[in-house]
Amino acid sequence: MALRIDKQIYKVLESEFKAGAGQAGGMVKTKLRSTASGRMWEPHFRPDARLEDLQLERQAMEFLYRDAGNCVLMNPDNYEQEEIPATIMGTSEQFLAEGMRVSVEFFEGRPISVVFPPSMEARVAETAPPMHSGQENTWKEARLENGVQIQVPLFIAPGEAVRIDLKTGRYLERVRGERKKGTSERAWSEPQAFYGPQ
């Protein structure tokens, strides 16, 4: 959801209801991101609070390049381009690669948020030679083909494809069934698959 609070627009990243004790009615804990500055805010609301839920338009767009703190994306239908500040994309912005498609949310014709899929595949460009260890949760540095540095298990070898959690930027699993080199970074879900069952 996107909310307008005190004339500012926020994107809801997380929300959780906390039951109250005794006569207390509980509260809704939220994590919001300002669509103007990218700053995080974690307010609590009463369950009966009235908030202005904004109607957003979504458009699948293709990432082209970065320019002076902005990410330039193109509408593949009409080739119009939009400059979107990297700050409003959150940490997932670092995983954008040329040609990737993401869903951009617009409010009153202005882009305010980018919806990333939960995870993506990327290929490991550099890491130490693989080894098997009896210890669990033992990690090593790895650099992906897009230049991002992450931690991976010791058994991962250079050239292997891995799945990354885009919310946290962390390794999830090794990708079984190798794809052709160069295609793994584009292995995103189609935009309509981002939002789960309708």
Image: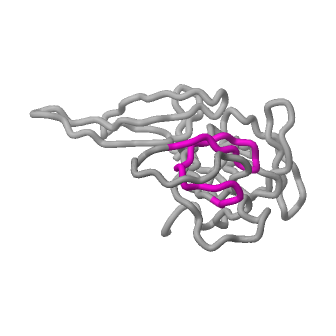
Q: Is residue 86 above or below residue 39?
A: below
Q: Residue at x 63, y 34 (%)?
A: 35
Q: Residue at x 64, y 50 (%)?
A: 129
**In this rendering, would 92 be left or right of 79?**
left
Q: Residue at x 67, y 62 (%)?
A: 188
Asked which quadrant contains residue 100, the reply is: bottom right
- The residue closer to the viewer here, 117 or 31, is 117
Asked which quadrant contains residue 92, the reply is: top right
Q: How are the residues colored?
A: one colour
**In this rendering, would 195 be left or right of 107?**
left
Q: Is residue 153 magenta?
A: yes
- The residue closer to the viewer here, 81 or 89, is 89
Q: Is residue 150 magenta?
A: yes
Residue 124 percent across, percent down from the top left: 69, 53
Q: Residue at x 46, y 44 (%)?
A: 138
Residue 29 percent across, percent down from the top left: 36, 35
Q: Is residue 126 above or below residue 49?
A: below
Extent of the magenta region: 139-161
- The residue closer to the viewer here, 53 or 121, is 121
Residue projecting furthest to the left: 22
**How many marks can you see?**
0
Residue projecting furthest to the right: 79
- The residue closer to the viewer here, 126 or 32, is 126
Q: Is residue 197 above or below residue 93?
A: below
Residue 128 percent across, percent down from the top left: 64, 46
